[in-house]
Image (cartoon, grey):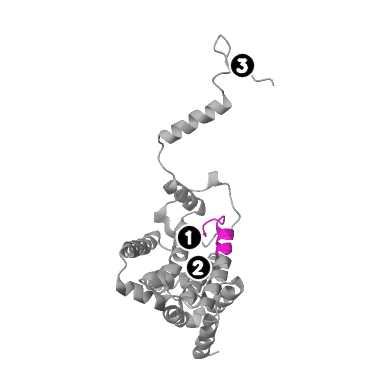
């Protein structure tokens, strides 16, 4: 199949994309199949459709990129060598997503009230990429900061509505059938997110197919190790960063637990604790 035909068929798949996993996996399989010869061209198709598509199609493309990145990293970890022609691309489409992340997010969540329907879903995907180290956490943080500032500006402008914003609201609202379609697709996507919350971060180590060993025998790694950073260390860092420092609330919780286990009123005359035999 020549590159032009590959591009045309891929564009057809993108325009038929919906929130179902069957539709997403069909596009992912096609993109990976023709990556070696047409990877850059297929990525241009994704960016083009993300720019021109409706607001609902754009969020579908972002969820497609989520599955595409995950599958790309799994393919690399299982094969050890991803690109057979010696290309410098080592992580399939993950490199493209990293390079154009800001552009993609700007298309999916455009400025103004038009981008509000996609804001929360986009933040969920970005936070998932950051926690699983799918993309560079610092790059993801920069994009999240941009989204937060954009939302803050919208909230501040909403408190002082002007005649221009009120007149533009009807033009940006979705048709009734698109609203119902979006509700069904959001239900499908949220179900998928709930299923994946317990999944451990993706291993970037090409030798991840080796038999697992006890955590106590694993070497210590950190962010500087890059691809060799262990999934266990990534998970620990995520928990460590989200855990607050010890404070008075923790002291009160400890005292309360001690009271439940060792009630202070259950002592005899000598101060010895009396065993409850009831």
* Residue at the spot 58% in from the left edge and 27% down from the top edge: 261
Q: Nearer the viewer, mark 2 or mark 3?
A: 3
- Residue identifier under label 3: 274
- Residue identifier under label 1: 128
Residue situated in front as seen by the camera: 247 or 116: 116
Determine the residue located farthest toward the top in the rendered image.
Answer: 269
Could you tell me which quadrant the C terminus lies in? top right
Would residue 7 be visible to someone looking at this image? yes
Q: CA distance from mark 1 to mark 2?
A: 9 Å
Q: CA distance from mark 1 to mark 3?
A: 51 Å
* Residue at the spot 41% in from the left edge and 76% down from the top edge: 170
Question: Where on the picture, by quarter, is residue 243?
Answer: top left
Q: Which span is picked out in magenta? A: 190-203
Determine the residue located farthest toward the right in the rendered image.
Answer: 278
- Residue identifier under label 2: 66
Dot 1 or dot 2, earlier in sequence: 2
Q: Is residue 201 magenta?
A: yes
Question: Where on the picture, by quarter, is residue 138?
Answer: bottom left
Could you tell me which quadrant the N terminus lies in? bottom right
* Mark 3 crowd level (few <14, some 14–19, many ≥20, 10 Å Cα): few
């Amino acid at each position: 199949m020549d590159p032009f035909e590959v591009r045309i068929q891929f564009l057809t798949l993108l325009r038929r994309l919906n929130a179902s996993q069957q539709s997403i996996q069909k596009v992912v399989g096609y993109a990976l199949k023709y990556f070696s010869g047409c990877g850059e061209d297929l990525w241009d198709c994704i960016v083009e459709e993300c720019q021109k598509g409706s607001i609902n199609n754009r969020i579908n493309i972002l969820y497609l990129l989520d599955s595409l990145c995950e599958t790309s990293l799994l393919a690399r970890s299982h094969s050890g060598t991803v690109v057979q022609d010696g290309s410098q691309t080592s992580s399939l489409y993950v490199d493209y997503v990293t390079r154009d992340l800001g552009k993609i997010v700007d298309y999916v969540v455009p400025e103004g009230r038009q981008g509000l329907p996609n804001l929360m879903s986009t933040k969920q995907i970005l936070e998932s990429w950051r926690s699983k180290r799918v993309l560079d956490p610092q790059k993801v943080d920069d994009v999240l900061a941009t989204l937060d500032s954009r939302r803050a500006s919208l909230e501040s402008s909403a408190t002082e509505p002007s005649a221009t914003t009120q007149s533009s609201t009807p033009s940006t609202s979705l048709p009734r059938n698109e609203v119902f379609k979006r509700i069904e697709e959001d239900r499908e996507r949220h179900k998928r997110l709930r299923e994946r919350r317990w999944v451990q971060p993706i291993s970037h180590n090409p030798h991840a197919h080796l038999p697992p060993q006890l955590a106590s025998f694993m070497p210590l790694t950190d962010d500087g190790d890059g691809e060799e950073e262990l999934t266990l260390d990534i998970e620990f860092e995520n928990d460590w960063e989200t855990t607050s420092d010890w404070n008075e609330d923790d002291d009160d919780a400890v005292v309360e637990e001690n009271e439940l286990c060792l009630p202070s009123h259950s002592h005899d005359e000598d101060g010895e604790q009396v065993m409850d035999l009831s």
